[in-house]
Amino acid sequence: MYRYDQYDHQMLADRVAQFRGQTQRFLDGKLSDTEFLPLRLQNGLYIQRLAPMLRIAIPYGLLSSPQMRKLAFIANHFDKGYGHLTTRQNIQFNWPALEEVPDILEHLAEVEMHAIQTSGNCIRNTTTDQFAGCAADEIEDSRAYCEIIRQWSTFHPEFAFLPRKFKIAVCGTKDDQAATQVHDIGIYIVCNEQGETGFKILAGGGLGRTPVIGHVMSEFVEKQQLLTFLEAILRVYNREGRRDNKYKARIKILVKETGPERFREKVQAEWNKIKDGAMKLTDVEIERCKSFFTAPAYRDLPESSSELDEALASDVLFSSWYHNNVKPHQRPGYAIANVCVKDTGTAPGDITARQMNFVADLADKFSFGEMRISHQQNIIFSDVEKSQLYNLWQALKSESLAAANLGLLTDVICCPGGDFCALANAKSIPIAESIQRRFDDPELLQDIGELALNISGCMNACGHHHVGNIGILGVDKKGAEFYQLSLGGSAGNRTSLGKIMGPAFAQEEIPDVIEKIVTVYRERREPGEGFIATYDRIGMEPFKERVYAKDE
Amino acid sequence: MQTLIKNGQLIDDAWVLVKEANDAGILQALPGRDLIVPFKFWKFQQEDIANYWGQITIWFDSDENVNDFKGSLDSFPLIGLNFPVFSDGRSYTNARELRENLGYQGEVRAIGDVLRDQLFYMHRCGFDAFQLRHDQDPEECLTAFSDFQNGYQASIDQPQPLFRRR
């Protein structure tokens, strides 16, 4: 992973000192709330319903074991013993004290972590697919480019006061795991006919109140031109994005109101002015960044492992976990192990300090001291020897981290919701828990198969409900909490936005509703057909009919 | 009290900033002073300006685009760029375009809601003069220019991005 040099360290130290000064001036009454607001947001600090919330960046989801241990330390010393993994590869702490935040940032700087620009009207954490560098279907490892984008966007002096937040995702695999098409800028790594690497760049995608899929700005940008092209898009947005209405201020609105083709022309015109300038990337820099993301010290191993085969034959629970949570690796003898932090009864994405330390130890023992955080709020050990998988699973089991439900119905993607968030219309965590309890049957879950269930507590869609196969949105109906269901969303290569099924439901009705939807699917599916394929084939009607039918 | 910073120092301001100017009457009200007037005013009052005794230069508001100026800006000794509210980031783009694309070498002055904590980024974008909001502590503001030792991106004060200097 990327290692900070003297410049990176100094940059971080300067930032911590700057924020310490700003916090002190705020506490001394020299900065107003309005003046302090963007300063604290761009250091990750929200003032929330119950307590301040600090959002810490995990650049492109990659974390080392010392970093995870530091997060555990912060959870214990500055918070209530746990953290929350988010849908954008960040971690949130819900209970820090305002005056202690500069100290927290100083601790984070020790392990090359920060909360820079994780909030505010600026460029946020650049995310990517969680299997970068080890996925079998990879075109090129996206992480070097993510790091290049991260540095370019950090403390960018021109784009710190955009009309609104700005989110960039990069995808380096054929199977899009980065929700690339619903980001402000989505970047696909592609190869042209000459075999050269470049980028297909989209702009204007997004979820939230008005979900939309991004439009292509260029089918192929040369890799050296990555930053100049991004600057061109940001500059047009900074100039022309709406500033009169917070709910119309994202780039997706600007692209729509300008017209995608016209917007594309503006970006090209701006790009022509700057593309031969100093921000054109050098091969030296690209190679330097790539050098941090080389393969770990893999051993030469045979493709299959007898230890693994024996364990699969003898242990049904392990076999279930293996078939669900373990993915193929590029390297013979290795595998990618997914750890679902989604046990029934815990809020999806929450992880205790104890679990953090435990996972750090496992990373050291089984996966070269590194792990990744996915958009589905799970943890990944990306380089586990197949022969060690059974040992890993047994260790996970001892800390309730062996949920074998990756990608299944109970691997719920869920925002913190009304229990924590001042923006929410409704609670989301109790909904997730009630569904997990209703479907707490491993065989049934396996039979249902892959099904993305996403829950958001309000229209800001932090749970990405628009791209859930089943999406649940908390709404406020005459002061009471209700839930609207949508079907047919999907976040991959065939990104689609879910369609609302009908009138909203009360909290207690939700498990029954989900059960009816699942039953219709199981009744109507063809052999081998997954939920989303069945939905595409039979449409909304059969589901709607069953859910809203009067009980006989 | 001096509230104009230029080249890292507090200096006396030789110019009068005219925020609103509806007609040429302003020129009679301030005879012989050096004025910074709104771009639109300058555009439509050419005749009266030609007869004016003092210097006249212009400022752009955040919703105006310096690229829309027909002709060369080089004859203006100073160009003001307004921040109607400090969180309106459009003037940062105007400053960079002035310097990088239009090659403007005169003074680029930040006016309006100009506060201590934005000065560093403003400077990197090409502002070299800062008319502080009246309630800002000028000495405290001078410290803002050393908030960071370095930067990742190309900037006006350091045109080579860090990746070319590592």
Image (cartoon, rainbow, N blue to C red):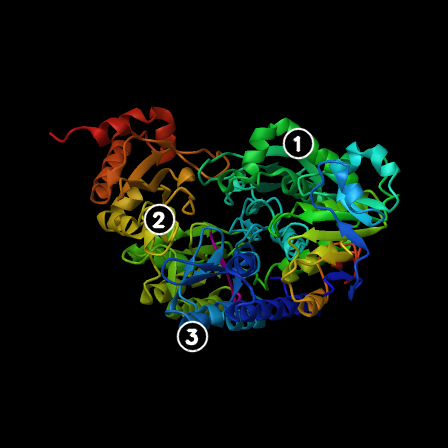
Q: Which residue is mark 1?
A: A264
What segment is highlighted magenta in the picture? A368-374
**What is the three-letter code of the residue carrying label 3?**
His
Q: Which residue is mark 2?
A: A412
The answer to which image quadrant residue A139 occupies is top right
- Tell me the element at label 1: helix
| Residue sitting at x 65%, y 59% | B134
Q: Chain of mark 2?
A: A
Q: Where's residue A141, x and y in %?
A: 61, 50
Q: Which residue is mark 3?
A: A77
Mark 2 and mark 3: Cα distance apart in space = 29 Å
Magenta stretch: residue A371 in it? yes
| Residue sitting at x 44%, y 61% | A53
| Residue sitting at x 71%, y 58% | A288
Q: The N terminus of chain A lies in which quarter of the figure?
A: bottom right
**What is the three-letter code of the residue carrying label 1?**
Arg
Q: Report the side of A318 relative to A211 (left or right).
A: left
- Tell me the element at label 2: loop
The foreground one among B97 and B25 is B25
Mark 1 and mark 2: Cα distance apart in space = 37 Å
Mark 3 and mark 1: Cα distance apart in space = 49 Å
